[in-house]
Image: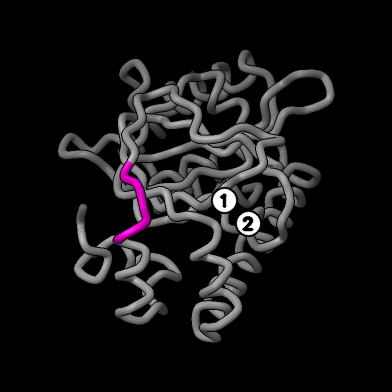
Amino acid sequence: MPDCNNCIVKELNSLNKLGTDELRQITDQKKTLSFKKGDTIFEEGTKLKGIFCLRNGKCKVTKLAPNGNEQIVRFIQKGEMIGHRSIISDTSAHLTVTALEDMEACFIPKSIINKSFSENKDFTYDITRSICADLDNANLSIANLAQKTVKERLADSLLFFLKTFGVDQDGFLNIKLSREEIANSIGTATESSIRILSGFKKDGIIEVKGKKIKIIDKEKLEHISIGY
């Protein structure tokens, strides 16, 4: 079992505020789990028994709408923790998390997280700050849904993918999403996202190869995202 004290991944989240003994305790009790693309890490309504720390890979976080449609509310990647809000608030999971590619995550029992949250003020402060940042991002997403056009939101999303996930060796965005997933991430119909992507491609703003997208004209996308 990899020692958390020597893990680079912990430097990307609030676990870096824990002391040597606390991290050794996590090492002794955690489980390293493997997930295949499309696997569900946990579902909305689940009573979680611990949190997940992503060792690698990417996930989508979704909310099921009353009409049965899936809305992607955010994406998470290597180093991020999942489920800590539900553990700290002692509530069932409000969202579903699904693997976008083959990945690994460390499962850390609830008892350890709650103990550190109550006893380690640096960990408490950092994880609370992280939750606040997530809420700020959620509020921004809600405002964008209400105030921006679908075209502007799609441009926003492509720029977000570029900033968050970077590009592969061929210059394509380092995340592969279906047209339906792209549509679900901006709150529109799949047909609308396909039509706008085709328009971006025709205008020379992006290049598309299957699920792979390359941004050709970042400046133009930035103009579209703010309504130019």
Q: Name above or below for residue 149 compared with residue 109.
A: above
Q: Which residue is mark 1?
A: 83
Tell whether label 2 touches label 1 (CB within 8 Å): yes
* Front one among 63 and 169: 63
Q: Which residue is mark 2?
A: 87
* Front one among 120 and 9: 120
Residue, x 71% and y 37% (percent of image)?
Answer: 149
Disc 1 to disc 2, C-alpha distance:
6 Å
Residue, x 48% and y 55% (percent of image)?
Answer: 109
**Residue type of the residue flagged with mark 1:** Gly
Q: Is residue 64 left or right of residue 32?
A: right
- At label 2, counting other C-alpha atoms closer than 10 Å, the crowd grade (few under 14, some 14-19, many 20 or more) is many
* Front one among 156 and 75: 75
Res 220 seen here: no
Q: Is residue 228 left or right of residue 210?
A: right
Element carrying mark 1:
loop
The part of the chain drawn in magenta is: 28-32
Q: Is residue 178 left or right of residue 190?
A: left
Residue 30 inside the magenta-drawn segment: yes
Residue, x 36% and y 53% (percent of image)?
Answer: 30
Residue 98 inside the magenta-drawn segment: no
Res 153 seen here: yes
Residue 202 falls in which quadrant of the image?
top left
